[in-house]
Image (cartoon, rainbow, N blue to C red):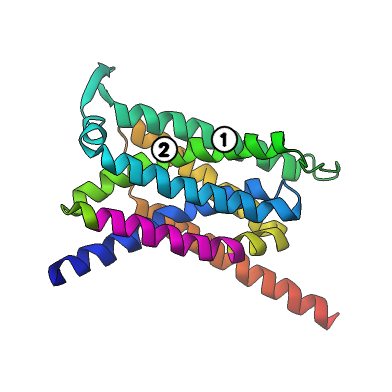
Amino acid sequence: MAESIIPLLSLIALEVILGIDNIIFISILADRLPGQQQKKLRLWGLTLAMLMRLVLLAFISWILKLDQSLFTLNKISFTGKSLILIAGGLFLLYKSTKEIYHKTEMANVPVIKAPSNAGFSQLLGEIILLDLVFSVDSIITAVGMVQELWVMYAAVIITVVIMMLASGPISSFISRHPSFKILALCFLLMIGVALLADGLGFHIPKGYIYFSMAFAFLVDVIQMRTVGKNARVE
């Protein structure tokens, strides 16, 4: 039991880092809904993410087969996992680009938030689609780190609980600061490129990606504080 604590904590830390992308994506989509439905969408999105990962863990042998080569094209070997990553990367690139366009080129056009159940269902469907991509990638990564199945289950449940607690403050922060919303969309754009590259066999170390994110976030915080101080002085 004791020897499983370190792998469990390591896996939770990794899952939380990987889950940041999911939280940002859900927060940006939730911002398109009326206030009372935003929390509901975040809760449903993260709950379904947890259930999806728990179900996929039950089919762990099938998930591992996704890492087996299906065909080769132009000296690039494609697996089930790579095809899912490519599809997820393209979807994330499309959504991020579309949202950035609406936040910049159409910034002066009034945005009508979707009040209907149809709008909620559509956004939830998009979250489920991306959850599937992140879940497959997460589980294959987890299998490479630990052997005990209960550790994987515990890590998934604990991680999603942490994400649920963090999703509200993160969503509120992004909503209050438009500049951070654009920065968050750029993060998702970069994650989409990384998923697409991974699917095509060009692995980009996640450490580089998250360091770039952290540095850009720090620069934006400094800029926001500087502008705020200058505004108070004037």
Please identify, in this view, whether the residue under mark 1 or under mark 2 is nearer the observer. Answer: 1
Q: Position of residue 62 (x, y in %)?
A: 24, 32
The amino acid type found where label 1 is placed reads Gly
**Residues in magenta?**
151-169
Inter-mark Cα distance, 1 to 2? 13 Å
Measuring from the top left, give residue 225's x and y in whole percent. Answer: 68, 74
Q: Is residue 179 above or below residue 66?
A: below
| Quadrant in the rendering for residue 70 | top left
Rendering quarter of residue 114: top right
Q: Is residue 13 left or right of residue 228?
A: left
- Left or right: 234 as drawn, with respect to 105: right
Work out whether mark 1 precedes mark 2 in sequence or the reverse, and give the earlier one.
1
Q: Going 66% across and 68% down the picture, which residue do you hit?
A: 223
Q: Which numbered marker is on residue 147?
A: none
Provide residue 73's location: percent of width, then percent of height: 29, 16
**Horizontal and vertical percent for residue 215?**
49, 63
Quadrant of the image for the C terminus?
bottom right
Where residue 148 sits, quadrant-wise, is bottom left
Relative vertical location of residue 183 with respect to residue 85 in this rendering, above or below: below
* Residue hosting label 2: 133
Work out whether residue 128 or residue 102 is closer to the camera in this orientation and state it: 128
